[in-house]
Image: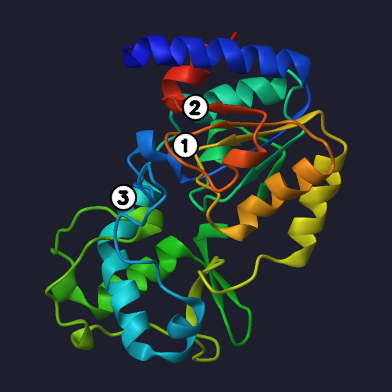
Amino acid sequence: MSDILIAQLAASKLQAFIERHPRLIVLTGAGISTDSGIPDYRDHNAQWKRKQPVQHHDFMNNLATRRRFWARSLVGWPIMRDAKPNASHKKLTELERAGHIPLLITQNVDGLHQEAGQQNIIDLHGRSDNVRCMTCAAQYSRNQVHDWMLELNPRFKELKAAAAPDGDADLERVDFGLFKVSNCPACEGVLKPDVVFFGDNVPRQLVEQSLQQLKRADGLLVIGSSLMVYSGFRFCKRAHEWGIPIAALTLGKTRADELLTLKLNSSIKDTLEQLS
């Protein structure tokens, strides 16, 4: 069966799911942004495609980890910063305007849902375009911090590497020990993108807000997530406990496959584009 036919059949099933459950909480993951040029983390078997992302504890306690992170970011951040919403983001905005999405919860940190016009959003893992001092809580734009790092490290400016998820890049065979990390200009504290790194916790308030909305919804629609991280899987777990139907549109395996009412293993963009 061709990919187009698979997408047509998936769109028909998803259309019926939306008509039966007209007020949906939508949970999105990295798979919805791949058509915008931002790579995802896992393959169709939900296995890592590359080394695991930086861990919160390592970033906070190891200067070498911060040097490697910010050096790779000099290459990877502009790719993420310049990415534009794709047809999938825009379709979800249309569904929100039609009254079908009272809340969109995203595991992504790219801000593309907002750029596409989505209004009711919870950024579960934060936003990569913001940077926060971990000592005094001062906030800076990622572009500003990026410029500081470039000024301190002109020899890194011309390096090239393939894009990796969330503003990272596959920059290797570089002496990261030469990289100078900019600290907070107010207090010299550690600067960190205002996102939830692996090993850190999603703010409880965001989880509670999301669950309150989910409890009132007709259904849960997962798009582009393997749900291997508990921060996203918890919503499927709760929906199942509460008897709320769950649909998933994503290529490959998910952690919640046994809980799903409807599983659509189809191209996200091609499927969503065919919804009326």
Residue picked out by circle 2: 88
Reading the chain from its start, which is encountered first: label 1 or label 2? Answer: 1
Residue 145 in picture, x, y percent from top left? 41, 70
Which amino acid does the dot numbered 2 rest on? Answer: Ser
Q: In the drawing, does residue 135 fall left or right of residue 245?
A: left
In the image, 139 versus 10, the foreground residue is 10
Cα–Cα span, label 1 and label 3: 16 Å
Q: Which quadrant is home to the C terminus?
A: top right
Q: Residue at x 58, y 73 (%)?
A: 200
- Asked if labels 2 and 1 touch by Cβ distance under 8 angstroms, the answer is yes
Asked whether residue 65 appears in the rendered view, the answer is yes
When the figure is inspected, residue 213 is found, relative to residue 50, above or below; the finding is above
> Which mark identifies residue 32?
1
The quadrant holding residue 158 is bottom left
Which amino acid does the dot numbered 3 rest on? Answer: Ile
Q: Secondary structure at mark 2?
A: helix
When the figure is inspected, residue 208 is found, relative to residue 106, above or below; the finding is below
Asked whether residue 181 appears in the rendered view, the answer is no
The image's colour scheme reads rainbow
Q: Residue at x 48, y 18 (%)?
A: 271
Q: In the drawing, does residue 216 fall left or right of residue 130?
A: right
The quadrant holding residue 15 is top right
Which amino acid does the dot numbered 1 rest on? Answer: Ile
Cα–Cα span, label 1 and label 2: 7 Å
Residue picked out by circle 3: 79
Q: Residue at x 42, y 49 (%)?
A: 46
